[in-house]
Amino acid sequence: MRRLFVCLALALALATPAAAALKPGAKAPDFTAPATLGGKEFTFVLADALKHGPVVLYFYPAAFTTGCTIEAHNFAEAVPQFKALGASVIGVSRDNIKTLDKFSVQECRSAFPVAADSTGALTRSYDASLSSLLAVSDRTSYVISPNGDIIYSYRALDPDHHVSNTLKAVKIWSDSQTRLNNK
């Protein structure tokens, strides 16, 4: 039933204009959320992750749907590149944590964590709701700098460019930090 709802929501969303995501330069809302990595649950704290470098935060509609599986595979394959640039990745959906335990192993390949936003508060704080359907997240990606500023945002239901776009944004940020440090 949930898959049917997600498919219907996606079809309706394609027929309506997407709401604007948070823009670069905005402060990223801080959050703490239940998360899982490789099926092991923990509490993800954005402020703690930012102490280690930029964070790629991406929202997706629902675990185990075609587009979300493609996107999870793409992020999993790119995690070594993100890590080489000092960045980490976390996905967020409205799925429950037990569903995400399985998704983190099977589709995220235990390469990065996914967080559960069961109330939708996190999704709303990042303007990542799919149109007016608050029960589903839109496919929205952010790159957040260590100081908590959003340096890149991208919204598209097609999962194909989220990884390449966020990787490029992290690379540009990393190169700028290298130039600053070499002055």
Image (tube, helix red, strand yellow):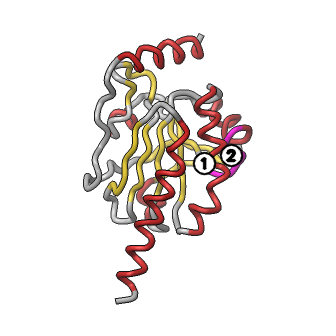
Q: Position of residue 41 (x, y in %)?
A: 63, 44
The quadrant of the rendering that contains the C terminus is: bottom left
Which SS class for mark 1? helix
Q: Residues within 10 Å of mark 2 (few under 14, many from 20)?
A: some
Q: Position of residue 156 (x, y in %)?
A: 43, 35
Q: Amino acid at mark 2?
A: Lys
62 up-or-down from 26: above or below: above
> Which residue is tagged 2?
40
Is 113 situated left or right of 134 in this image? right
Labels 2 and 1: the sequence-earlier one: 2
Tell me the number on the disc at residue 75: 1
Is 166 situated left or right of 151 in this image? right
Pick the front one: 102 or 153: 153
Q: Residues within 10 Å of mark 1 (few under 14, many from 20)?
A: many
Q: Amino acid at mark 1?
A: Phe
Which SS class for mark 2? strand
Q: Which residues are magenta?
A: 107-112
